[in-house]
Amino acid sequence: MECESRLFIAFLLILIVVLDDDINRNSQIQSSRCKNLFKLTQEQEERAKAIHRSSVVVDTHNDTILQIIRAPPFADNGTRVLPPRRTLGERSKDGQIDIPRARDGGVNVLLFAMYVSPHHRARLRRLLQMLDAFYTEVEANPDTIALATNYDEIIYALKAKKIAAIITIEGGEPLEEDIGALRMMYRLGVRSLTLTHFPRNELGDGSGADSGSHLSKFGREVVEEMNRLGMLIDISHLNETGFWDVMELSQDPVLASHSNCRALCSHHRNLTDDQIKALAENGGVMNLSFCAGFIKEGVNNRETLYKVTLNDWLDHLDHAVNLVGPNHIGLGSDLDGGCGFPGLDDVTMFPELTRGMISRGYADHEIKKILGTNDLRVFKKVLS
Protein backbone atom coordinates (compact mmCIF):
# COMPACT_ATOMS: atom_id res chain seq x y z
CA MET A 1 0.00 0.00 0.00
CA GLU A 2 2.83 2.41 0.92
CA CYS A 3 4.55 1.63 -2.38
CA GLU A 4 1.34 2.29 -4.30
CA SER A 5 0.90 5.62 -2.50
CA ARG A 6 4.42 6.66 -3.41
CA LEU A 7 3.85 5.69 -7.02
CA PHE A 8 0.60 7.68 -7.07
CA ILE A 9 2.31 10.77 -5.60
CA ALA A 10 5.13 10.44 -8.15
CA PHE A 11 2.56 10.21 -10.93
CA LEU A 12 0.84 13.38 -9.70
CA LEU A 13 4.12 15.28 -9.57
CA ILE A 14 4.96 14.23 -13.13
CA LEU A 15 1.47 15.24 -14.27
CA ILE A 16 1.83 18.68 -12.65
CA VAL A 17 5.18 19.24 -14.40
CA VAL A 18 3.73 18.18 -17.76
CA LEU A 19 0.66 20.39 -17.38
CA ASP A 20 2.76 23.36 -16.29
CA ASP A 21 5.01 22.85 -19.32
CA ASP A 22 1.94 22.72 -21.58
CA ILE A 23 0.60 25.95 -20.05
CA ASN A 24 3.92 27.72 -20.59
CA ARG A 25 4.16 26.40 -24.15
CA ASN A 26 0.60 27.55 -24.93
CA SER A 27 1.37 30.97 -23.47
CA GLN A 28 4.44 31.27 -25.70
CA ILE A 29 2.40 30.21 -28.72
CA GLN A 30 -0.27 32.82 -27.98
CA SER A 31 2.27 35.59 -27.40
CA SER A 32 3.91 34.83 -30.76
CA ARG A 33 0.62 34.56 -32.62
CA CYS A 34 0.35 38.31 -33.32
CA LYS A 35 3.97 38.46 -34.42
CA ASN A 36 3.11 35.86 -37.02
CA LEU A 37 0.12 37.96 -38.12
CA PHE A 38 2.17 41.12 -38.65
CA LYS A 39 5.41 40.83 -40.56
CA LEU A 40 6.97 44.13 -39.51
CA THR A 41 10.44 45.22 -40.50
CA GLN A 42 13.03 45.71 -37.79
CA GLU A 43 12.61 49.47 -38.19
CA GLN A 44 8.83 49.13 -37.74
CA GLU A 45 9.34 46.94 -34.66
CA GLU A 46 11.55 49.60 -33.08
CA ARG A 47 9.04 52.27 -34.05
CA ALA A 48 6.21 50.30 -32.42
CA LYS A 49 8.17 49.95 -29.18
CA ALA A 50 9.02 53.66 -29.13
CA ILE A 51 5.43 54.76 -29.81
CA HIS A 52 3.93 52.48 -27.18
CA ARG A 53 6.54 53.32 -24.57
CA SER A 54 5.98 57.07 -24.99
CA SER A 55 2.16 56.96 -25.17
CA VAL A 56 -0.58 57.43 -22.63
CA VAL A 57 -2.53 54.18 -22.94
CA VAL A 58 -6.11 54.29 -21.67
CA ASP A 59 -8.42 51.31 -21.16
CA THR A 60 -11.93 52.59 -20.51
CA HIS A 61 -13.50 49.37 -19.21
CA ASN A 62 -12.49 46.37 -17.12
CA ASP A 63 -14.25 44.13 -14.59
CA THR A 64 -11.19 43.36 -12.49
CA ILE A 65 -12.73 44.32 -9.14
CA LEU A 66 -15.57 41.89 -9.78
CA GLN A 67 -12.98 39.15 -10.23
CA ILE A 68 -11.00 40.17 -7.16
CA ILE A 69 -13.97 39.93 -4.80
CA ARG A 70 -14.76 36.48 -6.19
CA ALA A 71 -18.50 36.98 -6.50
CA PRO A 72 -20.41 35.50 -9.42
CA PRO A 73 -21.67 38.44 -11.49
CA PHE A 74 -25.19 37.04 -11.63
CA ALA A 75 -25.53 35.96 -8.01
CA ASP A 76 -29.03 36.23 -6.60
CA ASN A 77 -28.12 38.52 -3.73
CA GLY A 78 -25.50 40.98 -2.56
CA THR A 79 -24.59 39.49 0.77
CA ARG A 80 -21.71 37.15 -0.04
CA VAL A 81 -18.17 38.48 0.21
CA LEU A 82 -15.41 35.89 -0.12
CA PRO A 83 -11.68 36.27 0.53
CA PRO A 84 -9.95 37.85 -2.47
CA ARG A 85 -9.16 35.39 -5.25
CA ARG A 86 -6.17 37.55 -6.12
CA THR A 87 -4.95 41.07 -5.47
CA LEU A 88 -4.35 43.97 -7.79
CA GLY A 89 -0.76 44.46 -6.69
CA GLU A 90 0.53 40.94 -7.29
CA ARG A 91 1.24 39.30 -10.61
CA SER A 92 -1.26 36.50 -11.05
CA LYS A 93 -1.91 33.65 -13.44
CA ASP A 94 -5.61 34.21 -12.83
CA GLY A 95 -7.68 36.82 -14.59
CA GLN A 96 -6.42 39.32 -17.13
CA ILE A 97 -5.42 42.52 -15.30
CA ASP A 98 -3.22 43.33 -12.35
CA ILE A 99 -0.76 46.16 -11.76
CA PRO A 100 2.43 44.28 -12.77
CA ARG A 101 0.83 43.04 -16.00
CA ALA A 102 -0.68 46.46 -16.76
CA ARG A 103 2.78 47.97 -16.47
CA ASP A 104 4.14 45.26 -18.77
CA GLY A 105 1.47 46.23 -21.29
CA GLY A 106 2.19 49.93 -20.97
CA VAL A 107 -1.36 50.67 -19.81
CA ASN A 108 -1.38 53.64 -17.45
CA VAL A 109 -5.02 54.77 -17.20
CA LEU A 110 -7.65 52.20 -16.20
CA LEU A 111 -11.39 52.66 -15.65
CA PHE A 112 -12.49 50.10 -13.07
CA ALA A 113 -16.14 49.10 -13.44
CA MET A 114 -18.38 48.37 -10.46
CA TYR A 115 -21.01 46.03 -11.90
CA VAL A 116 -24.05 45.22 -9.78
CA SER A 117 -26.42 42.62 -11.19
CA PRO A 118 -30.11 43.60 -11.25
CA HIS A 119 -30.72 40.27 -9.50
CA HIS A 120 -28.98 41.44 -6.33
CA ARG A 121 -31.46 42.07 -3.55
CA ALA A 122 -29.26 44.75 -1.95
CA ARG A 123 -27.87 46.73 -4.87
CA LEU A 124 -26.48 49.69 -2.96
CA ARG A 125 -24.86 47.42 -0.40
CA ARG A 126 -23.29 45.43 -3.22
CA LEU A 127 -21.90 48.61 -4.78
CA LEU A 128 -20.38 49.66 -1.46
CA GLN A 129 -18.72 46.24 -1.15
CA MET A 130 -17.13 46.70 -4.57
CA LEU A 131 -16.02 50.26 -3.80
CA ASP A 132 -14.48 49.01 -0.56
CA ALA A 133 -12.57 46.33 -2.50
CA PHE A 134 -11.36 48.95 -4.99
CA TYR A 135 -10.16 51.36 -2.31
CA THR A 136 -8.51 48.53 -0.39
CA GLU A 137 -6.49 47.56 -3.45
CA VAL A 138 -5.50 51.14 -4.31
CA GLU A 139 -4.50 51.94 -0.72
CA ALA A 140 -2.40 48.76 -0.58
CA ASN A 141 -0.38 49.85 -3.62
CA PRO A 142 0.31 53.59 -3.18
CA ASP A 143 3.55 53.51 -5.16
CA THR A 144 2.02 52.08 -8.33
CA ILE A 145 -1.62 53.19 -8.59
CA ALA A 146 -3.63 56.26 -7.60
CA LEU A 147 -7.31 57.17 -7.60
CA ALA A 148 -8.01 59.93 -10.12
CA THR A 149 -11.18 62.00 -9.77
CA ASN A 150 -10.28 64.82 -12.15
CA TYR A 151 -8.01 65.54 -15.10
CA ASP A 152 -5.25 67.08 -12.99
CA GLU A 153 -5.09 63.95 -10.82
CA ILE A 154 -4.78 61.80 -13.94
CA ILE A 155 -1.82 63.87 -15.14
CA TYR A 156 -0.27 63.89 -11.65
CA ALA A 157 -0.44 60.08 -11.50
CA LEU A 158 1.10 59.76 -14.95
CA LYS A 159 3.98 62.07 -14.05
CA ALA A 160 4.56 60.00 -10.90
CA LYS A 161 4.74 56.84 -13.06
CA LYS A 162 1.59 55.47 -11.44
CA ILE A 163 -1.52 53.99 -12.99
CA ALA A 164 -4.41 56.46 -12.85
CA ALA A 165 -7.51 54.59 -11.64
CA ILE A 166 -10.96 56.00 -12.42
CA ILE A 167 -14.13 54.53 -10.90
CA THR A 168 -17.09 53.80 -13.14
CA ILE A 169 -20.41 52.10 -12.36
CA GLU A 170 -21.72 49.69 -14.98
CA GLY A 171 -25.49 50.02 -14.98
CA GLY A 172 -27.68 52.46 -13.07
CA GLU A 173 -29.32 49.82 -10.86
CA PRO A 174 -27.52 50.90 -7.63
CA LEU A 175 -29.08 54.38 -7.92
CA GLU A 176 -32.43 52.81 -7.02
CA GLU A 177 -34.20 55.70 -8.76
CA ASP A 178 -32.75 58.29 -6.37
CA ILE A 179 -30.82 61.23 -7.83
CA GLY A 180 -29.32 61.89 -4.41
CA ALA A 181 -27.62 58.49 -4.64
CA LEU A 182 -25.85 59.68 -7.80
CA ARG A 183 -24.51 62.70 -5.96
CA MET A 184 -23.32 60.51 -3.08
CA MET A 185 -21.56 58.18 -5.51
CA TYR A 186 -19.82 61.21 -6.98
CA ARG A 187 -18.68 62.17 -3.46
CA LEU A 188 -17.30 58.63 -3.07
CA GLY A 189 -15.11 59.13 -6.13
CA VAL A 190 -17.28 57.71 -8.93
CA ARG A 191 -16.69 59.65 -12.15
CA SER A 192 -18.43 57.59 -14.82
CA LEU A 193 -21.72 55.75 -15.22
CA THR A 194 -22.76 53.25 -17.87
CA LEU A 195 -26.47 54.07 -17.90
CA THR A 196 -27.72 50.50 -18.42
CA HIS A 197 -26.46 46.96 -18.70
CA PHE A 198 -28.21 44.43 -20.95
CA PRO A 199 -31.71 44.55 -19.37
CA ARG A 200 -34.01 47.46 -18.76
CA ASN A 201 -33.51 49.43 -15.56
CA GLU A 202 -34.97 52.57 -14.02
CA LEU A 203 -33.06 54.76 -16.50
CA GLY A 204 -34.03 53.06 -19.74
CA ASP A 205 -33.66 50.01 -21.96
CA GLY A 206 -30.44 48.09 -22.30
CA SER A 207 -29.60 46.87 -25.78
CA GLY A 208 -30.57 43.34 -24.75
CA ALA A 209 -34.12 44.37 -23.85
CA ASP A 210 -34.71 46.96 -26.53
CA SER A 211 -38.42 47.71 -26.83
CA GLY A 212 -37.73 50.97 -28.64
CA SER A 213 -38.34 52.93 -25.45
CA HIS A 214 -36.83 56.33 -24.71
CA LEU A 215 -34.90 57.14 -21.58
CA SER A 216 -37.21 57.31 -18.59
CA LYS A 217 -37.86 60.60 -16.82
CA PHE A 218 -35.33 59.51 -14.22
CA GLY A 219 -32.83 58.57 -16.93
CA ARG A 220 -33.06 62.05 -18.42
CA GLU A 221 -32.61 63.55 -14.95
CA VAL A 222 -29.48 61.43 -14.46
CA VAL A 223 -27.95 62.64 -17.75
CA GLU A 224 -28.56 66.27 -16.82
CA GLU A 225 -27.17 65.81 -13.30
CA MET A 226 -24.09 64.02 -14.62
CA ASN A 227 -23.44 67.02 -16.87
CA ARG A 228 -23.79 69.34 -13.89
CA LEU A 229 -21.51 67.27 -11.65
CA GLY A 230 -18.88 66.57 -14.28
CA MET A 231 -19.28 62.83 -14.81
CA LEU A 232 -18.56 60.74 -17.89
CA ILE A 233 -21.74 59.46 -19.55
CA ASP A 234 -21.21 55.98 -21.01
CA ILE A 235 -23.69 54.77 -23.65
CA SER A 236 -22.31 51.25 -24.12
CA HIS A 237 -25.13 48.74 -23.45
CA LEU A 238 -27.82 51.41 -23.99
CA ASN A 239 -30.55 50.80 -26.56
CA GLU A 240 -30.52 52.85 -29.76
CA THR A 241 -33.49 55.09 -28.92
CA GLY A 242 -31.94 55.89 -25.55
CA PHE A 243 -28.65 56.66 -27.31
CA TRP A 244 -30.31 59.34 -29.40
CA ASP A 245 -31.91 60.78 -26.26
CA VAL A 246 -28.45 61.13 -24.71
CA MET A 247 -27.11 62.79 -27.86
CA GLU A 248 -29.92 65.33 -27.63
CA LEU A 249 -29.58 65.95 -23.89
CA SER A 250 -25.88 65.92 -23.09
CA GLN A 251 -23.94 69.16 -23.17
CA ASP A 252 -20.66 67.25 -22.69
CA PRO A 253 -18.81 64.71 -24.84
CA VAL A 254 -20.02 61.14 -24.31
CA LEU A 255 -18.13 57.84 -24.22
CA ALA A 256 -18.91 54.39 -25.52
CA SER A 257 -16.60 52.57 -23.11
CA HIS A 258 -16.63 49.15 -24.80
CA SER A 259 -18.47 48.84 -28.12
CA ASN A 260 -17.68 47.80 -31.69
CA CYS A 261 -19.05 48.33 -35.21
CA ARG A 262 -22.42 46.81 -36.06
CA ALA A 263 -21.64 47.06 -39.77
CA LEU A 264 -19.02 44.33 -39.27
CA CYS A 265 -20.77 42.30 -36.55
CA SER A 266 -24.53 42.58 -36.08
CA HIS A 267 -24.58 42.06 -32.30
CA HIS A 268 -27.02 44.45 -30.60
CA ARG A 269 -24.20 45.69 -28.34
CA ASN A 270 -22.42 47.26 -31.29
CA LEU A 271 -22.97 50.76 -32.69
CA THR A 272 -24.40 51.57 -36.10
CA ASP A 273 -22.52 53.85 -38.48
CA ASP A 274 -24.98 56.65 -37.71
CA GLN A 275 -24.35 56.25 -33.98
CA ILE A 276 -20.58 56.34 -34.47
CA LYS A 277 -20.90 59.52 -36.54
CA ALA A 278 -23.16 61.14 -33.93
CA LEU A 279 -20.74 60.25 -31.15
CA ALA A 280 -17.95 61.95 -33.10
CA GLU A 281 -20.07 65.04 -33.75
CA ASN A 282 -20.73 65.16 -30.00
CA GLY A 283 -16.96 65.24 -29.42
CA GLY A 284 -16.99 61.84 -27.75
CA VAL A 285 -14.99 58.65 -28.18
CA MET A 286 -15.96 55.12 -29.21
CA ASN A 287 -13.70 52.68 -27.37
CA LEU A 288 -13.35 49.33 -29.10
CA SER A 289 -13.75 46.23 -26.96
CA PHE A 290 -11.89 42.92 -27.07
CA CYS A 291 -15.12 40.89 -26.81
CA ALA A 292 -14.85 38.22 -29.48
CA GLY A 293 -18.63 37.98 -29.88
CA PHE A 294 -18.78 41.69 -30.75
CA ILE A 295 -15.96 41.38 -33.29
CA LYS A 296 -16.92 38.49 -35.55
CA GLU A 297 -20.21 36.85 -36.49
CA GLY A 298 -20.76 33.34 -35.18
CA VAL A 299 -18.45 33.66 -32.18
CA ASN A 300 -20.55 33.18 -29.07
CA ASN A 301 -18.60 31.06 -26.61
CA ARG A 302 -15.10 30.09 -25.54
CA GLU A 303 -15.04 27.15 -27.95
CA THR A 304 -15.19 29.54 -30.93
CA LEU A 305 -12.69 32.18 -29.72
CA TYR A 306 -10.01 30.73 -31.98
CA LYS A 307 -11.91 32.13 -34.98
CA VAL A 308 -11.06 35.71 -33.94
CA THR A 309 -7.69 37.34 -34.58
CA LEU A 310 -6.30 40.80 -33.97
CA ASN A 311 -6.77 41.44 -37.69
CA ASP A 312 -10.53 41.13 -37.14
CA TRP A 313 -10.31 43.73 -34.34
CA LEU A 314 -8.25 45.98 -36.62
CA ASP A 315 -11.01 45.74 -39.23
CA HIS A 316 -13.35 47.39 -36.70
CA LEU A 317 -10.75 50.07 -36.05
CA ASP A 318 -10.32 50.74 -39.77
CA HIS A 319 -14.07 50.90 -40.30
CA ALA A 320 -14.58 53.41 -37.49
CA VAL A 321 -11.62 55.56 -38.55
CA ASN A 322 -12.84 55.57 -42.15
CA LEU A 323 -16.19 56.86 -40.87
CA VAL A 324 -15.08 59.59 -38.47
CA GLY A 325 -11.29 59.87 -38.55
CA PRO A 326 -8.79 58.93 -35.83
CA ASN A 327 -9.84 61.58 -33.27
CA HIS A 328 -12.83 59.72 -31.84
CA ILE A 329 -11.66 56.12 -31.38
CA GLY A 330 -10.06 54.54 -28.31
CA LEU A 331 -9.64 51.28 -26.39
CA GLY A 332 -12.11 49.66 -23.98
CA SER A 333 -11.01 46.07 -23.48
CA ASP A 334 -13.66 44.64 -21.10
CA LEU A 335 -10.92 42.33 -19.82
CA ASP A 336 -11.83 40.34 -16.72
CA GLY A 337 -15.40 40.60 -17.98
CA GLY A 338 -15.37 37.53 -20.20
CA CYS A 339 -13.59 39.19 -23.11
CA GLY A 340 -10.31 38.77 -24.93
CA PHE A 341 -9.21 36.22 -27.53
CA PRO A 342 -6.00 34.34 -28.41
CA GLY A 343 -3.24 36.85 -29.03
CA LEU A 344 -5.07 39.57 -27.12
CA ASP A 345 -5.97 37.69 -24.00
CA ASP A 346 -4.65 39.88 -21.20
CA VAL A 347 -3.40 43.39 -20.52
CA THR A 348 0.22 42.52 -21.35
CA MET A 349 -0.77 42.22 -25.01
CA PHE A 350 -1.66 45.90 -25.53
CA PRO A 351 1.63 46.54 -27.41
CA GLU A 352 0.30 44.23 -30.12
CA LEU A 353 -2.38 46.84 -30.84
CA THR A 354 0.37 49.31 -31.66
CA ARG A 355 2.13 46.77 -33.88
CA GLY A 356 -1.18 46.07 -35.58
CA MET A 357 -1.88 49.73 -36.24
CA ILE A 358 1.58 50.12 -37.78
CA SER A 359 0.83 47.15 -40.03
CA ARG A 360 -2.31 48.96 -41.21
CA GLY A 361 -0.42 52.14 -42.07
CA TYR A 362 -1.43 54.43 -39.20
CA ALA A 363 0.81 57.43 -38.53
CA ASP A 364 2.52 57.83 -35.16
CA HIS A 365 0.27 60.70 -34.06
CA GLU A 366 -2.85 58.73 -35.03
CA ILE A 367 -1.73 55.72 -33.01
CA LYS A 368 -1.10 57.89 -29.95
CA LYS A 369 -4.59 59.37 -30.23
CA ILE A 370 -6.23 55.95 -30.42
CA LEU A 371 -4.10 54.56 -27.59
CA GLY A 372 -5.16 57.28 -25.19
CA THR A 373 -5.06 60.98 -26.01
CA ASN A 374 -8.56 60.94 -27.53
CA ASP A 375 -9.97 59.77 -24.20
CA LEU A 376 -7.72 62.21 -22.33
CA ARG A 377 -9.30 65.02 -24.34
CA VAL A 378 -12.75 63.99 -23.10
CA PHE A 379 -11.48 63.58 -19.54
CA LYS A 380 -10.06 67.12 -19.64
CA LYS A 381 -13.37 68.50 -20.88
CA VAL A 382 -15.66 66.61 -18.49
CA LEU A 383 -13.56 65.89 -15.40
CA SER A 384 -12.54 69.50 -14.84
Image (cartoon, grey):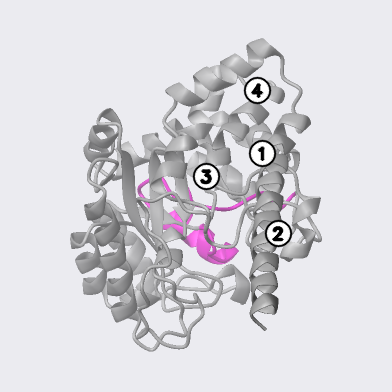
**Height in image: 126 above or below 89?**
below
Type of residue at label 3?
Answer: Val
**Which-is-in-front pick, marks 2 and 3?**
3
**Which-is-in-front pick, marks 1 and 4?**
1
Q: Position of residue 139 (x, y in %)?
A: 22, 54
Type of residue at label 4?
Answer: Ile
Q: Which residue is mark 4?
A: 358
Q: Secondary structure at mark 3?
A: helix
Neighbour class for label 4 at 10 Å: few (<14), some, many (≥20)? many
Q: Which residue is mark 1?
A: 31
**Which-is-in-front pick, marks 4 and 3?**
3
Q: Which residue is mark 2?
A: 293
- Residue at the (63%, 33%) spot, across then down: 321
Sequence-wise first label, 4 or 2: 2
Relative depth, front residue between 289 and 284: 289
Check whether the beta carbons of the residues at disc 4 and disc 3 lie within 8 A of each other: no
Distance of mark 1 from mark 4, alpha carbons? 18 Å
Q: Position of residue 235 (x, y in %)?
A: 49, 58
**Which-is-in-front pick, marks 1 and 2?**
1
Type of residue at label 2?
Answer: Gly
Sequence-wise first label, 4 or 3: 3
Neighbour class for label 2 at 10 Å: few (<14), some, many (≥20)? many
Check whether the beta carbons of the residues at disc 1 and disc 2 lie within 8 A of each other: no
Q: Is residue 255 magenta?
A: yes
